[in-house]
Image: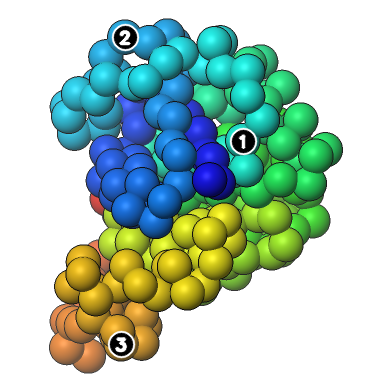
């Protein structure tokens, strides 16, 4: 059975964490939820509380995938953690999968993981990641060899299915779509932004661009 560890830190984006954990377990992946600060309860970005299976310090097994959810504060804490750094470096050295969504790729950049690879993230981090040595893409999910990245809460199912496909095979991932009632349509048209009418879309973009940085970061987190 393939295995994965999800690193859960205070301020993690709960939808990205829970959807990923749930879908992977449906896909037959043995998922361990490891608390960055210990095995105690973790308060996520919207005050949802999750109890990890164990602490990151206690993780000793070699996992097929290490997964970092988004959430600005959570990703910052992971990016500052020497324990997370060691785990990620060992994972990269072994040629095993690393997956990160939303703000998660910022933690990878902080630890110098998979520099030069193609990736994506929450849009607000495009410039940081591009200048940090990565090839940035605006696709909803990007798979570059052993690196899997995605954009935010609205792409969490696609992100999780990409991980299942990598660990358990495409056939297994495809088998999960219908039972979860995921519409099999072009993800481009599922995006909130592109469901807006043309005039509203332009207005939304102008407002977004003219807002302070705090607005852009808090839109997702």
Q: Residue at horizontal 33%, vertical 61%?
A: 157
In primary-sequence order, the first of circles 2 and 1 is: 2
Mark 1 vs mark 3: in front: 1
At mark 1, the secondary structure is loop
Q: What crowding class fits label 3: few (fewer than 14 Cα within 10 Å), some (14-19), or many (20 or more)?
A: few
Real-space Cα separation, disc 1 to disc 3, in angstroms? 32 Å
Above or below, 31 against 26 in this view is above
Labels 1 & 3 near each other (Cβ < 8 A):
no
Residue 122 - label: none
Q: Position of residue 41 (x, y in %)?
A: 27, 14
Above or below, 200 against 21 in this view is below
In front of the other: 76 or 167: 167
Q: Which residue is mark 1?
A: 63
In primary-sequence order, the first of circles 1 and 3 is: 1
Q: Position of residue 122 (x, y in %)?
A: 44, 55
Q: Which residue is mark 2?
A: 40
Mark 2 vs mark 1: in front: 1
Quarter where residue 74 is shown: top left
Q: Position of residue 45 (x, y in %)?
A: 26, 32
On screen, residue 114 versus residue 119, left or right, reads right
In front of the other: 166 or 112: 166
Q: Which residue is mark 3?
A: 185
Above or below, 159 against 170 in this view is above
At mark 2, the secondary structure is loop
On screen, residue 156 versus residue 6, left or right, reads left
Q: Residue at horizontal 34%, vertical 21%?
A: 52
Q: Is residue 89 visible?
A: yes
């Amino acid at each position: 059975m393939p295995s994965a560890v999800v690193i859960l830190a205070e301020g993690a984006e709960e939808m990205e964490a829970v959807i990923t954990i749930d879908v992977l377990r449906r896909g037959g992946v043995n998922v361990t939820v490891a608390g960055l600060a210990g095995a105690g309860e973790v308060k996520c970005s919207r005050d949802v509380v999750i109890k990890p299976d164990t602490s990151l310090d206690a993780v000793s097994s070699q996992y097929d995938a290490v997964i970092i959810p988004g959430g600005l504060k959570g990703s910052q804490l992971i990016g500052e953690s020497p324990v997370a750094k060691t785990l990620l470096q060992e994972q990269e050295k072994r040629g095993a999968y690393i997956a990160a969504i939303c703000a998660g790729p910022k933690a990878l950049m902080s630890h110098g993981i998979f520099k030069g690879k193609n990736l994506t993230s929450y849009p607000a981090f495009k410039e940081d990641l591009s200048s940090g040595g990565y090839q940035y893409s605006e696709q909803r999910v990007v798979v570059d060899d052993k690196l899997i990245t995605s954009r935010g809460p609205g792409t969490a199912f696609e992100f999780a299915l990409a991980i299942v496909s990598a660990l358990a095979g495409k056939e297994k991932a495809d088998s999960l779509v219908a039972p979860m009632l995921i519409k099999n349509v072009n993800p481009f048209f599922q995006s909130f932004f592109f469901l807006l009418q043309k005039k509203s879309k332009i207005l939304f973009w102008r407002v977004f661009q003219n807002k302070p940085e705090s607005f852009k970061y808090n839109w997702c987190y």
